[in-house]
Structure formats: C-alpha cells, structure tokens
Amino acid sequence: MGKVWGKRWSRGASTRRGRRRLVGALLAGALAFSVPLTAVAADRDDVVARQKESAARVEKLKSDLNGIDSKLAAVYLELDSLKAKIPVAQSELDAANTKFEAATRQHQVAADQLDSAQAERTRLETEVAAAQEDQKRATDAIAELARQMYRGEGSSPLTLAMTAQSTQEIGDRASAAETLARSQNRTMEEARTSQVVEQNRVERQKAVTTRISALEEKARTAAEEAESAKATAESKVAELKDLKAQADAKAKEWDSKKAAAAKQLDAWQAEYNSMTSKLANIDAANRAAGTVYATGGGMFTSPLPVPLVVTSSYGWRVHPVLGVKKLHNGTDFAAACGTLQYPIAPGVVSAVTNEVAGGNVVYINHGMINGHSWISAHVHLQKVDVSVGQRVDRSTVVGETGATGYATGCHLHLTLMRDGATVDPMAYL
C-alpha cells in the first residue's frame, strides 16, 4: 500500500494527504458518473440555450454598433466577448475548486477506514502468531503425552485405578487417576480451543486483507482521477489568466481607437443631417404638386423576397461606443449578401449616393400616399441596379444586399421618412 501512495504522491506531500486527495477525487468521479441521463440532457439543453442567447446578443451588439466601420466594430466585439467569457471561466474554476475541496473533506472518512483496516490487520497478525504458538505448545504437549503412553512411561487413569493393592490404595489411586484425567482433558481442550481461535483469526485476517486490497485498488484508480482533476483545474486557471490578459490587451487597443470610432459616428450623423436637408426639398415639392406614384396594391410591401426578420429595430438606444442615446434611424433586416431588394412602393429614384457611413444608398421618392409625402432609403447595398430619375415599381430590383460603409455584416437597413422625418418602417410594412 505504501508503495502505491508513495509513487503517486511523493511530490512535496505526505502519504496521508495524498491518500485523501486520491479518494476525494475518486468520490468526486463517482458522483459525476452517477448523474442521471435526464440531468445530462438538461445541462446540454441549457448550454444550447446559452449559445443561442449569446449569438443573439452578438447580433444585437453588431446592430448597436451602427455608425462605425467593421474593423473597429470587430475590436469592440472581441473585447465584449472576452469580458463575457471571463465570468464563465471564473465560475468553472470556482466549481472545480469547490468540488475538489468537498471531496477532500469526504476523504477523511475513507482514509480513517483504511488506516483502521491496516491497524486491524497488524493486530490480527500478532494475535494469529500468538495463537499459532499456543497451538504448537498444546500439540507438543499432546504428542509428548502420547509418546509417554506408547513407551509405557506414563499411566492412564484406568491403569492407576485397576492396579491398586488395598482399599486405601484404591482410593488414593482413584483420586490420582481423576486428577490425571482432568489434566489430560484440560490439555486436549486447550488444544482444541487454541485451534478454533487460530482458525477464526486467520479467517478474519483474510477478510481484512481482502478489504484492504479493495481499498488499494480504489486508491490506484483514484490516483488517475485526481491527477486528471488537478490537470483540469490547472488548465482552468491558465485559461482564466489568459482570458484576462487578452481582455486587458484588447481594452487598451479599444481605448486607443475609441476616438476614431467617435469621429466615424459624427461623420454618420453629418451625412444623415445633410441628406435629410436635401430630402426635405423633395418632400416640399411632393406636397406642393400632390405627386402620386402608387397605383394600388396596398400602402407598402416587403423589400425582400425572404421573410422579414428584424435584427435591429428603429428607435433610440444607448450607443456602446459613446454611452449616450443615439437614434437608429431605420430598421435592420436579416438578409444574406447578394439578396435582391425591391421598392416598398412605386416611385422615382431621387438619389444614388456612395456615403462614408451608409455605403451605397438608394433613395426612392414615393410621392403622396394618404396625404403624406414618403421617401425610403436602401442602405449598405453591395450593388446598385437603378439610376437617378428612374421610375420603379414593386417588381424593380433596386440592388443587392451588402455591407458597404459602416456595416458589421450584410443586411438591409431600411429608412422610411414621412414628411421629412424618419418613422418606424415596421409600423407600415
């Protein structure tokens, strides 16, 4: 037993402490393998749910980064991802340490049982040796008695009684015979008792030896489990340190580029303000002339040939870069790169621009509908298929979905203006 522990845990730890760790790891391993399949399935479902939540959060953050280019957004996204991973890694490390500490405490019982079994075996070995010695002496005494009787050197109780010469002698010899018989019987009884005691102790010794052998086998298995658990814990520590180091480095990188991101946001706002001023003139002309392009078929229809999936809604939100409220002046819809886009209503292309923030943008004047002037804008196109002054209807291809300008991925950013002010497109589609 000592060899097993010594080989496994000779690196700076005592045998007892090593055994406790080993059995603790074994107990922890047993607990782990005893988890019901339903619990494992629940854990897996929980992991899948967290992955979906994380993916949705990343997509939302990408949309919230509207107004800065993809390279800067990538730095921020990576920083945010590292920050999210740190508490997860810390939680995993804490759980591993808690499990190991609990197993170590539980090991005290197992270690005491092992020590007790070893002490019992040692005691039984001593008692068996003493019993064997008693048995040898009793056997030798019986053998000597047998030899004496064989050689005629001794007398049996019956011989002593039958060879008496007188009544007095018969009485004396009967008394002597009784004494001799008792002595011989006592010798025989002691021999039989000693033999039974020895057999019992030998059986107990075998049982204890078997029990110790089982504990030693558990210890050998526990050694591998403990070393594996230790390696896992060390890996978690290293992972946590690495994540923190990466996060610190990425935070410094982001801080150095944060000012550039703020400038890009300002450029986006400036472009928006400039275009809004130009579109105001178009709105005024629509109202003055009562321009009408729509010829029925509903007010507005979907700009995409796929189901509309909103990835970022219209409205005010706290921008992750500046930490202040900024207006997201349109609605973002999920669409793969190259997906065709169509006008939401008949109209005339009023402008095709290549903007720093918006990339390729197509503005369509829909004229007067239900007493209001309407203009829509398709933003971040990778390809434009219309030109200024072109008349379009619901079947005209405006262009292909892209990620030009300050976009973090391909999508449709649709802006809708009513009488010169942006509104939520989802209220009308």
Image (cartoon, rainbow, N blue to C red):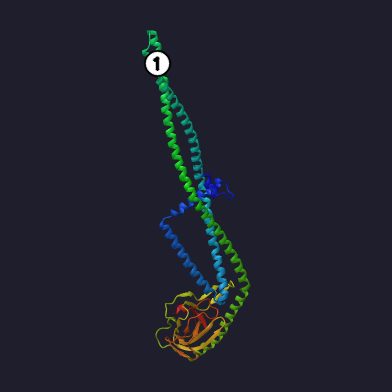
Report if residue 319 is visible in the image. no
Neighbours of disc 1 within 10 Å: few (<14), some (14-19), many (20+): some
Please give the name of the residue rendered at 61% of the width and 68% of the height, measured from the top-left corner. Answer: 249
Residue 275 point in image, percent of width and height: 55, 85
- Of residue 420 and residue 400, the one placed in the foreground of this image is 400
From what the image shows, is residue 414 above or below residue 47? below
- Of residue 24 and residue 413, the one placed in the foreground of this image is 24
- Of residue 164 and residue 229, the one placed in the foreground of this image is 164
Q: Amino acid at mark 1?
A: Ala
Please give the name of the residue rendered at 50% of the width and 37% of the height, measured from the top-left corner. Answer: 122
From what the image shows, is residue 316 above or below residue 167? below
Instruction: Tally the marks.
Output: 1
Residue 279 point in image, percent of width and height: 53, 86
Report if residue 274 is visible in the image. yes
**What element does badge 1 sit on?**
helix
Residue 186 point in image, percent of width and height: 42, 23
Q: Which residue is mark 1?
A: 177
Residue 135 point in image, percent of width and height: 45, 29
From what the image shows, is residue 419 above or below residue 30? below
Quadrant housing the C terminus? bottom left
From what the image shows, is residue 282 above or below residue 132? below
- Of residue 399 and residue 308, the one placed in the foreground of this image is 399
